[in-house]
Amino acid sequence: MATLSLPRRLSEAVGAWMHLEYCSYRAGVFSESSLKAVIGSVLSTVPVKARGTRAHAEYNHPALNVIKRPGAPNMVDFALILNGASINGEAYIETKWAGSSHCKDVNILKDFLRLANIKMVEPDAKCIFLMAGKSSDLAALFNSFPFRTTSQGKSNGFQLTSGEVKMKFDHLDQDFFLKASPVFSELIDRGMTVPMSLTICCHGIFPSDSVPYKAKFQAVAWEITQVDTPIIQKLWYRKATGKNKGAVRAK
């Protein structure tokens, strides 16, 4: 187990746990919140340099709250960081449950960009996006934005192939622009940065599709390994007005 990367440990642990729960007739209680226990269990086993509480859910990270606003702050779903420490964290994780009302294409893109903002200020931290759910729901998501970003279904979005892949944000790709510009604009309004590209590494789907049977539930994780320089905002920014205002809501 020590040889497995943290993203792979998370995806395999979540995938195996879901299969156990499914075999135990408890799949009916699956949701994004039900992942807290298993993700917290894995994070608590990762060594850190000092002792203390280290696995946190809904962690208030300053990179997500550059502009202070009324109400609850923006939070990352999970963090591996010593409680009360001023030092940087070891890892930050955003999660989505495929099939839920919140697991929309624009929200998936937003999660990657939120993690990218953390990566900018903590370049040594592992920033991981994990998605889990029914294999049929995952397959449907993989065939749409932001995994396939054009109307022709060209695979120039977030990739499932292993190894590092750079995803460039192209404002001349109209299909991508129409989906991405409201997300980019919202994050800009919140004081966050949108990079020109993200370099990500997929750590595989678990249980794998190569096993003799098709698993009912699966998990997959990506790590952001590199963040590019900021976009030219005037090419992307579109101020939300009228009926479109608030169309892309904050997490």
Image: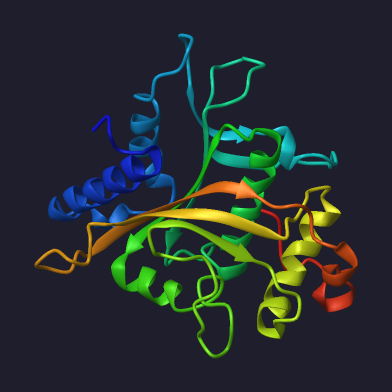
Along the viewing direction, whichever of 24 and 158 lies nearer the viewer: 158
Q: Is residue 49 left or right of residue 197?
A: left
- Total labels drawn: 0
The image quadrant that residue 40 belongs to is top left
Q: Is residue 25 left or right of residue 183?
A: left
At x 40%, y 77%, the residue is 140
> Percent from the top left, x then y, of residue 174?
72, 84
Q: Is residue 98 left or right of residue 168?
A: left
Q: Residue furthest bottom?
A: 152
At x 81%, y 75%, the residue is 244
At x 34%, y 45%, the residue is 8
Q: Let me know if residue 247 appears in the view.
A: no
Identify the coloring: rainbow
**Is 46 placed above or below 249 here?**
above
Along the viewing direction, whichever of 198 and 104 lies nearer the viewer: 198
**Is 11 placed above or below 235 here?**
above
> Percent from the top left, x then y, of residue 188?
82, 55
Q: Residue furthest top?
A: 51
Q: Quadrant of the N terminus?
A: top left
At x 19%, y 55%, the residue is 22
> Percent from the top left, x then y, of residue 56?
50, 29
Q: Let me know if residue 201 appears in the view.
A: yes
Q: Is residue 192 left or right of residue 108?
A: right
> Percent from the top left, x then y, of residue 19?
19, 53
Along the viewing direction, whichever of 171 and 245 lies nearer the viewer: 171
Q: Residue furthest left?
A: 212
The image quadrant that residue 239 belongs to is bottom right
